[in-house]
Amino acid sequence: MNIKLGKNAYGKNAVNLSKIIRHAEHHEFRQISVNVALQGDFETAHTIGDNTKILPTDTQKNTVYALAKEHFNGSIEDFGIYLCNHFTKNNPQVSQAEVEITEHLYARMAFDGTTHPHAYISSGNEKHTALIVQNSNGVTVTSGIKDLLILKTTDSGFEDYIVDQYTVLKPTADRILATQCEATWEYSKGGLNYQDQFDSIRTTMLKTFAFHKSLSVQQTLYAMGEEVLKAYDEVKEISLIMPNKHHIPFNLDQFGMDNKNEIFMATDEPFGYITGTVVRG
């Protein structure tokens, strides 16, 4: 029987790192989680236990912390690019390095119109993500947003869908639209100001969501992706995940009261799960 090793990789996950960048007038606080995955010539490590080509995952962890001192001062994309280049340049047995970074977002507190120099408040569950892959074909950079909870109270409906023997959902032209959005977009070129790109793309997505007259979550998903591609030539494609966070009108008739789209029951499960990728034609 002919048996051989297939695709494989190894690395270090959940390298949790916090950094204070001390400016003259204020402190900048950053909190990230880094995953590293290496592919390459590691067959003998699996087949005969030869570790001579293995860079220990503990070393990978230490590398993230050590390089963060001088090289994590800007975007997570730039830091990921630096890490990938370090691992491939210093380890000829590595054919591909993949670095995934998730940043927990904070904002400086403000009081009486003045921003505090070193006190921060969490921006909620929202996270900035980046995935950097470096191999013989070059470097690809994918940025994204995760756990972005957005909601609007009107300009959303859902009508004219299939009705069969199991359908009890009532059509509506006015409902709450809420989703915990996740989006990732791949850049078609490098050398960008990735933080500015992230901020601008995020604003475009939010503005589209807010002002779009939604006939379905699918239509809003497509509109958000379409606006990003129209506004940013450097974005190759964008994928979105938009689970429907249901807010169901509560039955006040049982109490002799009218519910004029005012009182809702928020439900976590089950929920609709809508995904899509918007690409250039």
Image: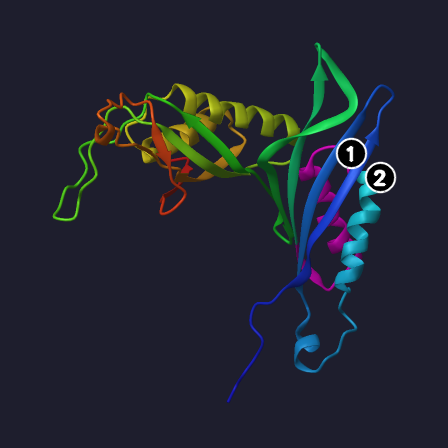
Find residue 88 and name its label: none
Identify the residue at horizontal 60%, vertical 40% (top origin). 129
Quick check: 46 left or right of 213? right
Quick check: 106 left or right of 202? right
Can the viewer see residue 208 in this picture? yes
Which residue occupies the foreground of this view, 141 or 178?
Answer: 178
Quadrant of residue 167 within the rendered picture: top left
Q: Amino acid at mark 1?
A: Asn
Identify the residue at horizontal 50%, vertical 37% (top origin). 236
Which residue occupies the foreground of this view, 160 or 188?
Answer: 160
Q: Position of residue 280 (x, y in %)?
A: 41, 35
Is 84 covered by the magenta stretch?
A: yes
Quadrant of residue 78 within the rendered picture: top right
Which residue occupies the foreground of this view, 115 or 190?
Answer: 115
Quick check: 64 left or right of 264? right
Q: Which residue is mark 1?
A: 73
Q: Secondary structure at mark 1?
A: loop
Mark 1 closeness class: few <14, some 14–19, many ≥20 residues within 10 Å? some
Q: Position of residue 41 (x, y in %)?
A: 68, 68
Judge whether 67 appears above or below 175 on screen.
below
Q: Position of residue 255 (x, y in %)?
A: 24, 28
Q: Amino acid at mark 2?
A: Glu
Identify the residue at horizontal 78%, vertical 34% (top origin). 73
Q: Position of residue 69 (x, y in %)?
A: 84, 41
Judge whether 231 appears above or below 122 on screen.
above
> Which residues fall within the magenta stretch?
72-97
Quick check: 223 left or right of 171? right
Q: Which residue is mark 2?
A: 70
Pointer 1 with pointer 2, Cβ within 8 A: yes
User: Which residue appears farthest toward the left when viewing the image?
Assistant: 165
Q: Secondary structure at mark 2?
A: helix
Is 149 covered by the magenta stretch?
A: no
